[in-house]
Image (spheres, rainbow, N blue to C red):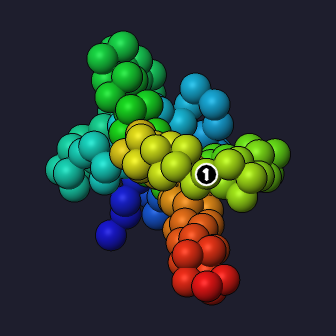
Amino acid sequence: MSAAVCVRCGGEKSDYASSCPACGHRPTGDGLPIAWLLSAHNLDRKGREAVAERIRAGETLRPGRAQLDKARRAMGHTLASDPGLSTRQRVGLLATCLLLTPLPAWVMGLWWIRSRPRAGVQALALAVPTTALFTAIGLWGVFGTS
Ligand SMILES: [Zn+2]
């Protein structure tokens, strides 16, 4: 079963972001939201077949702004399209966790988990162990020295 239709030739491919086995076209940049619209994320099998027919007939697809916005929003919500945090951001967040408090990592993680899932998971991955560490230090401070 094909999961996406090639924007250029109407051929079938497994994933909207992959290159087309028939013509080699690989969507990039502004082409990605259009490719997403022609995939199983947006169209059922019948819809994909219909759009493939139109492309093979030589029709150029011009999705409306609302459709493109829908695609961009949906793509932003998937782990694969979220680039996550840069190394510098992660180091900065880790330093904040260790030197001050893990609280910002918790807040950021929970804030991002829906809009930027990868960044959210990364922030929580820093928050959990540093919170455990702080708790351990806190308990040691209370019970360990008496
Ligand atoms: Zn193609």
Percent coordinates x, y for residue 39 in the rendering: 36, 48
Q: What percent of the width, then of the height, locates residue 32?
A: 54, 36
Q: Quadrant of the C terminus?
A: bottom right
Q: Position of residue 38 (x, y in %)?
A: 37, 41
| Residue 132 seen from this side | no
Q: Disc 1, ligand 1: is the CB inside 8 Å?
A: no
> In terms of image quadrants, where is residue 118?
bottom right
Helix, strand or loop at disc 1?
A: loop
**What residue is at 28 percent from the left and 43 percent from the top?**
42
Q: Which residue is mark 1?
A: 101
Frontmost residue, 85 versus 43: 85
Question: What residue sits 37% from the left and 63% below the top?
Answer: 2
Q: Pick the residue in front: 3 or 30.
A: 30
**Which residue is at 56% across, 31% downward?**
31
Residue 101, placed above or below residue 1: above
Camera-side residue: 56 or 69? 69
Q: Position of residue 142 (x, y in %)?
A: 55, 75
Residue 132 occupies which quadrant of the picture?
Answer: bottom right
Q: Quadrant of residue 8?
A: top right
Q: Quadrant of the N terminus?
A: bottom left
Q: Residue furthest top?
A: 65
Label 1, residues with CA under 10 Å away: few <14, some 14-19, many ≥20:
some
- In the picture, measured across the screen, residue 27 lies left or right of residue 54, that is right
In this view, which residue lies farthest toward the front? Answer: 146
Q: Is residue 94 left or right of residue 11?
A: right
Q: What type is the residue that disc 1 sits on?
A: Thr
Q: Is residue 128 left or right of residue 19?
A: left
Q: Please name the residue shown 55% across and 66% down the image.
A: 131
